[in-house]
């Protein structure tokens, strides 16, 4: 929250970003597993399935 909604609030941009809601900007990665649920040794092995930038899905391995 400190680097998402709270940061957007401080910048007075919380109406545009900071949380995943309809109508808001959202850039995020789609991962194979929850990074909070794996141990630190296997964290680096989590596969990235894709990235959403500006509402557009970019599957892993695709050129932008």
Image (cartoon, rainbow, N blue to C red):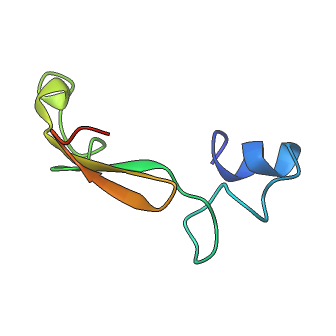
Vertical relation: 34 (above or below) 41: below
Vertical relation: 6 (above or below) 45: below
Using the rendered view, name the quadrant where residue 21 is placed.
bottom right
In the displayed structure, does residue 53 sit left or right of residue 24?
Answer: left
Using the rendered view, name the quadrant where residue 43 is placed.
top left
- Classify the position of the C terminus by image quarter: top left
Q: Position of residue 37 (x, y in %)?
A: 23, 46
Residue drawn at (15%, 37%), measured in percent from left and top?
46
In the displayed structure, does residue 58 sit left or right of residue 4?
Answer: left
Vertical relation: 45 (above or below) 14: above
Residue drawn at (64%, 39%), measured in percent from left and top?
3
In the displayed structure, does residue 52 sit left or right of residue 62?
Answer: right
Q: Position of residue 51 (x, y in %)?
A: 33, 48
Q: Residue furthest front?
A: 64
Q: Position of residue 2 (x, y in %)?
A: 67, 41
Residue drawn at (11%, 29%), measured in percent from left and top?
45
Q: Position of residue 14 (x, y in %)?
A: 78, 58
Residue drawn at (33%, 58%), measured in percent from left and top?
57
Vertical relation: 4 (above or below) 43: below
Front residue of this view, candidates 56 and 29 = 56
In the displayed structure, does residue 53 sit left or right of residue 9?
Answer: left
Q: How many marks?
A: 0
Front residue of this view, candidates 36 and 48 = 48
């Amino acid at each position: 929250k400190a680097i998402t909604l709270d940061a957007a609030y401080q910048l007075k941009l919380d109406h545009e970003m900071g949380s995943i809601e309809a109508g808001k900007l959202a850039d995020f990665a789609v991962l194979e597993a929850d990074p909070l649920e794996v141990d630190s040794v296997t964290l680096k092995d989590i596969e990235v399935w894709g990235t959403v930038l500006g509402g557009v899905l970019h599957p892993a391995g695709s050129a932008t």
